[in-house]
Amino acid sequence: MPEPTTNQRQPSLPGLDAEATAVVGIGLGLTGLALGLRPRLAPATLALTALAAALFRNPRRIPPDESRTVFAIADGRIQGVREVYEHRFVHSDCLRLTTVIGPLDVPICRAPVAGRVAYIEQVRGDYRPLRDPQAPERNQRLYIGIETVWGPVLLSIIAAPLGRWLRCETTQSATLAAGTRIASVRFGGQVDLYIQRDVIEPQVTPGDRTLAGQSRLGAVVA
């Protein structure tokens, strides 16, 4: 099965975003220059190049063929599962599954389910620490609402203090397969998934690690 994709530029370096080509090229050029002029600096420039490349990782992800599974949106760690009322798109009592993306985690967000993009809103905001209770409603954030055959799902992608590169990579009315790349947030962030309370049976607990498009957040029971 091919990996679900949107209309993204194809990466020039396997496993990395297209933007990484220039970063790696410049870093290797500086390393070569350091070898010629200041050999002692070469390991440092090479290490910085490797770190920069890590921030542009784009690993191949093919979700299992499970139509009633809700997959992880991002690489990170489950912070919490709680009941809330969602007023922006779902308009219902929901479970909110929160995933925290670390600064060095893969920065790509993927669709947790198959469906049609019915809502997109990008909001400018602050860059508060994610531990601040007001961060989900005050920080820069991106909302993506997906209509599925069993109901609506809302994703809220929230930038961390360093995560100032938050980019939407899907479009209104786009048809998504589970695992399709839909956004990126570099240098850390948080993703909240809102899904109707009676629709999903969670399969994660706080502290669990997730891989976008691979890990199972829950099973659809509706």
Image (cartoon, rainbow, N blue to C red):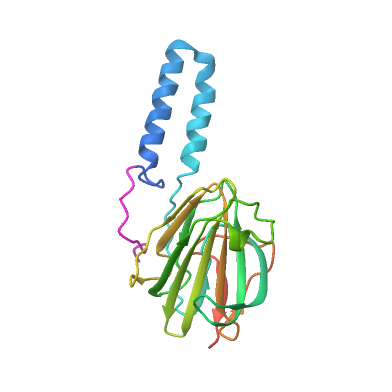
- Assign the N terminus to one quadrant of the image: bottom left
Extreme-top residue of the structure: 37
> Where residue 4 appears, x then y in whole percent?
36, 64
Whether 191 is among the magenta residues is no
> Where residue 94 appears, x then y in whole percent?
60, 79
Above-or-below relation of 30 to 107? above
Task: Give the camera-side residue of 80 and 121.
Answer: 121
Residue under the point 41% across and 45% down: 16
Left or right: 87 as drawn, with respect to 14: right
> Where residue 29 appears, x then y in whole percent?
39, 24
**Residue 111 occupies quadrant:** bottom left
Residue under the point 57% across and 71% down: 217
Total count of labels: 0
Magenta stretch, overall SS: loop
Extreme-bottom residue of the structure: 222
> Where residue 107 appears, x then y in whole percent?
50, 52
Residue under the point 49% across and 53% down: 185
Q: Which span of residues is magenta-colored? A: 1-12
Whether 5 is among the magenta residues is yes
Residue under the point 49% across and 42% down: 54
Left or right: 120 as drawn, with respect to 75: left
Above-or-below relation of 12 to 7? above
